[in-house]
Image (spheres, rainbow, N blue to C red):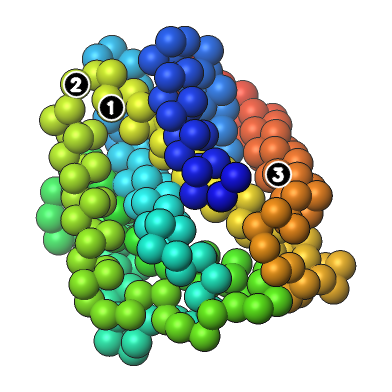
Amino acid sequence: MKVRAIVAIVLVVLTLAVLVSPGQTMSMAYWVGYAVCHQMPSHSFFMGKHQMPLCARCTGTFLASLITVLWFLVVKRDKSTLLPPLPIEFVLLAFLAIWALDGLNGTLAELDLFHLYAPGNSIRMVSGLLAGTSIGVFAVYLFNNVVWKLPKEEPLAKNPDDLAIILALDGLLSLMVVFGPSWLVLVLGVLGILGVLVLLWMFMLSILLMLVGKVGAFVEWRDLLWAGLAALLAAALFVVSIDLVRFLMTHRLPPTW
């Protein structure tokens, strides 16, 4: 079965799991989010009375990262190993700068110091979406260059249209989070957590392959079975370890459903 079909099945099954058993699914999502996000209620969107598993900025960041990774998979650039043209690279770096500046502005506002504008969850999410797009591009670039033996010597994003489509999808998701019904926001919240896991898996696999000297050793996705499982285990151990350290340091648990 092609990897695209597997991804589609996973997304459908995940959506059904969220809708059939939201409490259990969200409990796991909160613990994953606990490893990468402060989960402050004041910085988070809510699904009715329930807090999303990631804050507004992290929701945008990891949703956009997931959409970017999936987009390159759909358009068959999952083995492309060249960065986009320089103008697009500059735009992607600008997105990261906007994300950093928005975070700094929010911190200054919380400290009651001079800041440029009043922070808000919608702004946090937009800055996260922009940064997540950039992170997704660079994550796929790293992954493809580390994993594939027979890569495609072509840019991930060939022209501004590619970036525009990804940003349009990101914008649609942001509108769904802010204005969508609770059940849809619930699904998007879990998809944000899936974005966390996908990025962690990609980075862990890349690190493991570099550590064992297997860079550029794989031809097809099916060849990644055992290495991919090892990376998945490493990602899970990372989440558990960070959760444990955070709990020992703060004695605070993640939100509950």
Q: Judge whether 230 appears above or below 145 on screen.
A: above
Residue at the bottom extreme of this rendering: 86
Q: Judge whether 155 appears above or below 220 on screen.
A: below
In primary-sequence order, the first of circles 2 and 3 is 2
The residue identified by callout 2 is 181
Distance from Cα at disc 2 to Cα at disc 3: 32 Å
Where does the N terminus fall, quadrant-wise? top right
Q: Do residues under tags 1 and 2 come within 8 Å of each other at their CB atoms?
A: yes
x, y percent for residue 83: 44, 81
Task: Examine the image and state in which quarter residue 220 appears.
Answer: bottom right
x, y percent for residue 131: 35, 61
| SS category of the residue bearing label 3 | helix
Task: Examine the image and state in which quarter residue 243 appears.
Answer: top right
Measuring 58% from the left and 38% from the top, which residue is drawn there? 35
User: Type of residue at label 2?
Assistant: Pro
Residue 159: assigned label: none
